[in-house]
């Protein structure tokens, strides 16, 4: 009797602890299921953000709970956060018997974030597992067609005209042809020319040819390398390296170094002055594109010993976004500085421009794939060192036509009143773009 009493006294704490642990596990499981179902109900009631908060908290404490991760992925896709959807899908991507709605949601997110090969593999799995699912079949067919078109040879043509700070009319034309030679690589050839209608600047004309490669390391990193040469006399060789990085689907970072900058003023080129150029830029938008931001910085090292730096940034907010019209207010700030005075080309010691732009975009019902017009009206102030600040203003109109998935055209016209060295000039600019894929 005494032995049994002692034994019971010894094991009773362990039995009690085990029972409490079992009760805690049951309580945690019930809480998990209850919170999970609450999140699903919120999602079905279109309370997607609230649902995702609950599911994220559950994933933190229960990272191996498949249903929670699955639904977090699906609802993130519904909510437009494809970066989160694709990231959280990785731990379960090799799981067999994935649900059809999970496959459909993740595949859409993958294709929208440049992961076409991953999306295609997942959709192939889906078509085999769910041959009657129309959503999976239609997206698979669409993506196959998009990949085929994307890999076809492409021709891009650009041309335009504008006025320099001296009132001379400048013109340019560019043609670029590219063709795929590997799954993630294309070669390209490019021709570029720019000239003015003033014979005084004829020696500044450019007739340049180049060739290079375009390579996608992965969905986030893109590299373009070009080597070019002046076709008149086959001199002035140059190299242009472009690197693009997408940390997320909302942010693009851009860097480019050109040992021969093609945007040097013609008045400088006419005297044999050239420059290299480093450009850094970034673009960000919210998931609904309500807010957009862009910023850039450029540095030039002219051969006449002048160093120029320039910057530009804007912040835009869309206060109306409908199927047929978008209205956006954009605040702009730009400026530049130069280290050398009294050059033949326009190089203020320092200058700053601040402007407010109103953009209205019209989306038209059309026989084409897409037709959008943009009307921009701006007013601002230009402040150049050594001169009094003066107002700038103008308007531009643009039309964009996507005739089909392989054929597009756009044109842009601007009339603006700008200021150079304290003198006001009316500037007219016109640009056209034409793109064609060859099937």
Image (cartoon, rainbow, N blue to C red):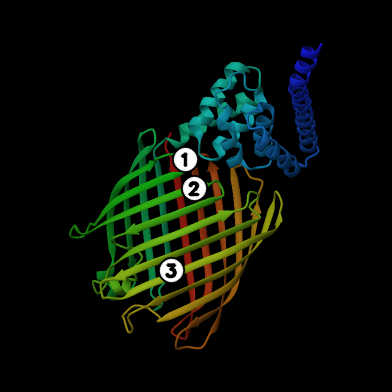
**Do the numbered discs 2 and 1 sit on residues whose CB atoms are within 8 Å?**
yes
Q: Residue 219 carries which label?
A: 1
**Do the numbered discs 1 and 3 sit on residues whose CB atoms are within 8 Å?**
no
Q: Where is residue 236 in the image (x, y as percent from the top left)?
A: 22, 61
What is the distance, in whole Å, between disc 1 and disc 3 at their CAs? 37 Å
The quadrant the N terminus occupies is top right
Sort mark 1 into few (<14), some (14-19) or many (20+) by Cα contacts within 10 Å. Answer: some
What is the distance, in whole Å, between disc 3 and disc 2 at their CAs? 33 Å
Of circles 3 and 2, which is in front?
2
Indicate which disc, 2 or 1, sits on the residue closer to the N terminus.
Answer: 1
Judge whether residue 78 can be spotted in this image.
no
* Identity of the residue drawn at 49% across and 47% down: 246
Q: Position of residue 173 (x, y in %)?
A: 37, 58
The quadrant the C terminus occupies is top left
- As drawn, is 427 to the left or to the right of 341? right
Q: Quadrant of residue 40?
A: top right
Of circles 1 and 3, which is in front?
1
Disc 2 marks which residue? 246
Indicate which disc, 3 or 2, sits on the residue closer to the N terminus.
Answer: 3
Q: Which mark is residue 162?
A: 3
Up-down: is 147 above or below 310? Answer: above
Q: In which quarter of the image is residue 172?
A: bottom left
- The one of 351 and 77 positioned closer to us in this rendering: 77
Secondary structure beneath dot 1 equals loop
The extreme front residue here reads 2
């Amino acid at each position: 009797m005494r032995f049994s009493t002692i034994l019971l006294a010894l094991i009773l704490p362990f039995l009690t602890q085990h029972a409490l642990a079992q009760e805690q596990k049951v309580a945690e499981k019930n809480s998990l299921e209850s919170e999970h179902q609450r999140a699903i109900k919120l999602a079905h009631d279109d309370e997607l953000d609230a649902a995702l908060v609950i599911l994220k908290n559950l994933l933190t404490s229960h990272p191996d709970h498949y249903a929670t991760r699955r639904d977090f992925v699906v609802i993130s896709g519904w909510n437009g956060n494809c970066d989160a959807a694709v990231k959280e899908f990785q731990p379960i991507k090799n799981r067999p018997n994935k649900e059809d709605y999970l496959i459909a949601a993740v595949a859409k997110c993958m294709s929208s974030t440049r992961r076409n090969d991953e999306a295609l593999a997942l959709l192939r799995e889906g078509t085999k597992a769910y041959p009657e699912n129309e959503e999976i079949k239609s997206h698979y067919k669409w993506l196959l067609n998009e990949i085929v078109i994307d890999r076809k040879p492409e021709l891009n043509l650009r041309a335009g005209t504008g006025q320099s700070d001296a009132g001379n009319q400048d013109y340019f034309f560019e043609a670029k042809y590219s063709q795929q030679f590997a799954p993630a690589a294309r070669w390209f050839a490019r021709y570029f020319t720019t000239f003015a209608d003033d014979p005084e600047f004829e020696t500044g004309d450019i007739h340049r040819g180049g060739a290079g490669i375009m390579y996608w390391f992965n969905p986030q990193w893109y590299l373009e390398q070009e080597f070019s040469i002046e076709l008149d006399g086959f001199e002035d060789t140059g190299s242009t390296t472009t690197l693009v990085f997408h940390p997320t689907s909302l942010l693009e970072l851009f860097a480019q170094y050109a040992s021969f900058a093609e945007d040097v003023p013609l008045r400088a080129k006419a005297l044999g002055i050239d420059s290299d150029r480093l450009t850094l830029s970034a673009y960000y938008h919210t998931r609904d594109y309500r807010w957009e931001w862009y910023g850039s910085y450029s540095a030039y090292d002219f051969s006449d010993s002048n160093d120029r730096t320039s910057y530009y940034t804007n912040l835009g907010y869309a206060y109306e976004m409908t199927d047929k019209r978008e209205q956006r207010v954009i605040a702009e700030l730009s400026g530049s500085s130069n280290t050398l005075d009294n050059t033949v080309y326009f190089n203020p010691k320092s200058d700053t421009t601040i402007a407010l732009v109103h953009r209205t975009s019209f989306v038209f019902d059309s026989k084409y794939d897409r037709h959008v017009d943009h009307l921009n009206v701006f007013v601002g102030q230009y402040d150049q060192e050594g001169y009094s600040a003066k107002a700038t203003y103008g308007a531009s109109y643009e039309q964009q036509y996507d005739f089909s998935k392989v054929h597009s055209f756009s044109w842009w016209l601007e009339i603006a009143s700008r200021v150079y060295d304290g003198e006001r000039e009316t500037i007219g600019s016109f640009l056209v773009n034409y793109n064609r894929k060859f099937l």
